[in-house]
Image (spheres, coloured by chain):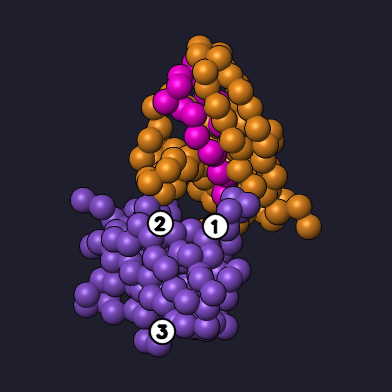
Amino acid sequence: AQKITQTQPGMFVQEKEAVTLDCTYDTSDPSYGLFWYKQPSSGEMIFLIYQGSYDQQNATEGRYSLNFQKARKSANLVISASQLGDSAMYFCAMREGPGGGNKLTFGTGTQLKVEL
Amino acid sequence: NAGVTQTPKFQVLKTGQSMTLQCAQDMNHEYMSWYRQDPGMGLRLIHYSVGAGITDQGEVPNGYNVSRSTTEDFPLRLLSAAPSQTSVYFCASSPQGINSPLHFGNGTRLTVT
């Protein structure tokens, strides 16, 4: 079974609008971390935001917020006030504890295009 | 402020050739890993290491070897290149712990003909 599922291969959003990128995960480990990365067309991997499994509040970093619904095992990324520079591939990832080797597993990504 | 340094940036190999992708980090991170990125498949873990002298297999280890003789370096060896190994390879490092994001190198684009 996929540990991280991103069901939206591609998304379009108008500039200045908000957009939600979906991510669901699967783990039996009670302790894990969830991450979102951005990969622009230049290819580098940029860390955006982190959510811990025990965190009570949703993580926020500037225009990025993580909508964490633990019971549903979802960790959606919300980008507010989209900008043209947000056009990129976005990856959701999960890091499990020592029992899972501390490995970080990625989803297949969502290509976001911000339009004027 | 070097971070994670990968070399080379680009490489073309013929089928059957071997080569080593270099990865070095200067952040004293215990954890290092190699991923390959293929269109539509995200990043898949090849091998990883939780410290010097310790390595383990990831999701797609076949055809690749690693070693970790120092904290700083984590080279990836392709033993006998195959066209299926055409990909973009990323090295990444982090402190241990589920709350630590990976720091990535800039990637190596490898083509096997």
In the image, residue B83 lies in the stretch drawn in magenta: yes
Query: Is B64 placed left or right of A6 in the picture?
Result: right
Q: Who is closer to the viewer here, B79 or B43?
A: B43
Judging from the image, mark 2 belongs to the subunit labelled: A
Q: Which chain is purple?
A: A
Q: How far separated are the C-alphas under marks 2 and 3?
A: 21 Å
Kind of residue at badge 2 = Gly
For label 2, count other residues whose C-alpha is less than 10 Å away and answer few (under 14), some (14-19) or many (20+): many
* Residues rendered magenta in the picture: B75-94
Q: Position of residue A45 (x, y in %)?
A: 57, 56
Q: Which chain is orange?
A: B
Kindly indicate whether the residue at mark 2 contacts the one at mark 1 (C-beta within 8 angstroms): yes
Closer to the camera: disc 2 or disc 3?
A: 2
Q: Which residue is mark 3?
A: A58
The answer to whether B36 is drawn above or below residue A47 in the figure is above
- Circle nearer the N terminus (3, 1): 1
